[in-house]
Amino acid sequence: MASLTVRQLDEKLKRRLRLRAAKNGRSVEDEVRTILRSAAADVESFAGTAELAHGAEAPIGPVRKTAAMRVVLIIGGGIAAYKSLDLIRRLQDRGAHVRCVLTRAAQHFVTPLAAAALAGERAYTDLFDPQSEFDVGHIRLARDADVIVVAPATADLIAKMANGHADDLATAILLATDRPILVAPAMNPRMWAAKAAQRNLAQLKADGVRLVGPNEGEMAERGEAGTGRMAEPLEIAAAAVAMLRAAGALAGRRVLITSGPTSEPLDPVRVLANRSSGKQGHAIAAAAAAAGADVVLVSGPVNLPDPPGVTVVHIETAQQMLVAVEKALPVDVAIFAAAVADWRPLHVSGSKIKKHGRPPTIALTENPDILSTVAHKKSGRPRLVVGFAAETDNVVGNAEAKLKKKGCDWILANDVSPATGIMGGDRNTVHLVTAAGVESWPPQSKADVARTLIERVTAAVTEFKR
Ligand code: CTP
């Protein structure tokens, strides 16, 4: 394998690496390793899942950044641990990448294999596992997450947390993390009512840990009922999402996004449309919601599920898109990722156009330019207006011209020639064009483009006065 000397990189790159490493709490060498692994994981993104299906241990590696939310789920040793397997799914339904850590006691109730199979990644169990310590380590597990969920949190685990113990992987992560922690207690009602347990809980609350549940109801022990049942997986997943959104960098900001194609009717059965899949716009909506924004997504017809936590307005035509966009205003940020049809048939036939001799000539008329309309608003203009430029030639030059003509603040330009596979594909190569110049981003998944864009938007928005 080739070796790489960080010292030989140019100063600007080194400075950026140092900043990035500091932000992520890693050494520069570790940061470089993370970037390289991430690039490799991107190429082989499904290799791990395939291996798991054949019973092999899932490969250890960095968290794929494509997930909207990264969760470390710590499973404690209680009968409710079986529900945590369902919680993995419920979190995934909300776009989360889940990494599981099982305490020794948890392994009496559920197996690491079951958790790994559901999570699609090996489950972590041991503080002194040389393989995971070398490659991931408890510090990375503690930091490479947006939220840490402890479910079930037993009386013993809560006591250890309250007192800062770190004698196993779960408690070491909990002590080392600077990320928000959500705890779902589960214990016998008498244990829950015990003074010592309540003292520990008060300490956790004072430390900023959030609680969900416990609920009232029947216990696993026959004839026992009261407060102590773990909250349901759906409640825990909802609480994790709500907590992240409230803490997100875009919390309290309203973001409007357009996505997908528009479809312009010619008659009841025929339309004028384009090949946009909506993948990029939908990924941006998911990333903005994950950052805590209040997101309205105006989408043309696509074969994609609505992103979780986003208000979606489904439309078909450019005119309907404009109406929906106007209705969503005012917003702080508007991002126009839709491939709006430039023209629509001038006349829409009420009944199917029949074949009568010669093919008909279809007269077209121009659609409203939604981006330009919003960017040129005299009052109520969003503080940041971002457009896309879908080009097949002179990508950056055309995008620079569009930036001026449309009056937006930024344009993300991409080459949609069929050979690039961008239209409809999962990856994208974009150039960020602003008044300050052009920045070319490396080829990456559309989800990563979305995250990077939202990071940039977040940085810009923090400059705005409320
Ligand atoms: N756009 C829009 N309304 C339209 C056409 C485009 O809001 N009627 C927006 C797109 O969502 C995108 C930007 O304008 O953010 C540029 O779209 P693009 O298709 O690249 O350019 P056009 O304006 O259609 O120009 P051309 O087809 O000549 O390249």
Image (cartoon, rainbow, N blue to C red):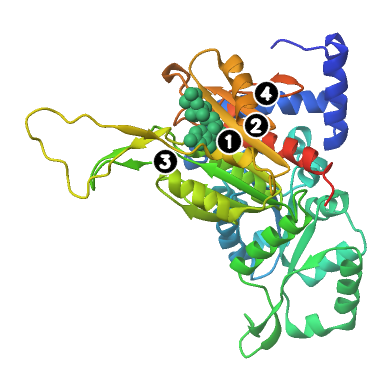
As drawn, 198 above or below 452: below
Task: Identify the image quadrant of residue 457.
Answer: top right
In the rendered image, residue 299, in percent from the top left (x then y), is placed at: 48, 47
The residue at 89%/73% (across/down) is 202
In the rendered image, residue 44, in percent from the top left (x then y), is placed at: 55, 28
Q: Are marks 4 and 3 in contact (CB under 8 Å)?
A: no
Badge nearest the viewer, 4 or 2:
2
What amino acid is at disc 3? Thr
What amino acid is at disc 4? Val
Instruction: Give the spatial CA distance, label 4 vs label 2.
Output: 13 Å
Instruction: Give the spatial CA distance, label 1 vs label 3.
Output: 17 Å
Instruction: Give the spatial CA distance, label 3 vs label 2.
Output: 22 Å
Q: Are marks 1 and 2 in contact (CB under 8 Å)?
A: yes
What amino acid is at disc 1? Ser
Which numbered disc, 1 or 4, marks the residue that appears first in the sequence?
A: 1
Residue designated by label 1: 372
Residue designated by label 2: 407
- SS for callout 2: loop
- SS for callout 3: loop
Residue designated by label 4: 433
As drawn, 405 above or below 6: below
Ligand 1 within 8 A of label 3's CB?
Answer: no
User: Residue extending furthest bottom?
Assistant: 223
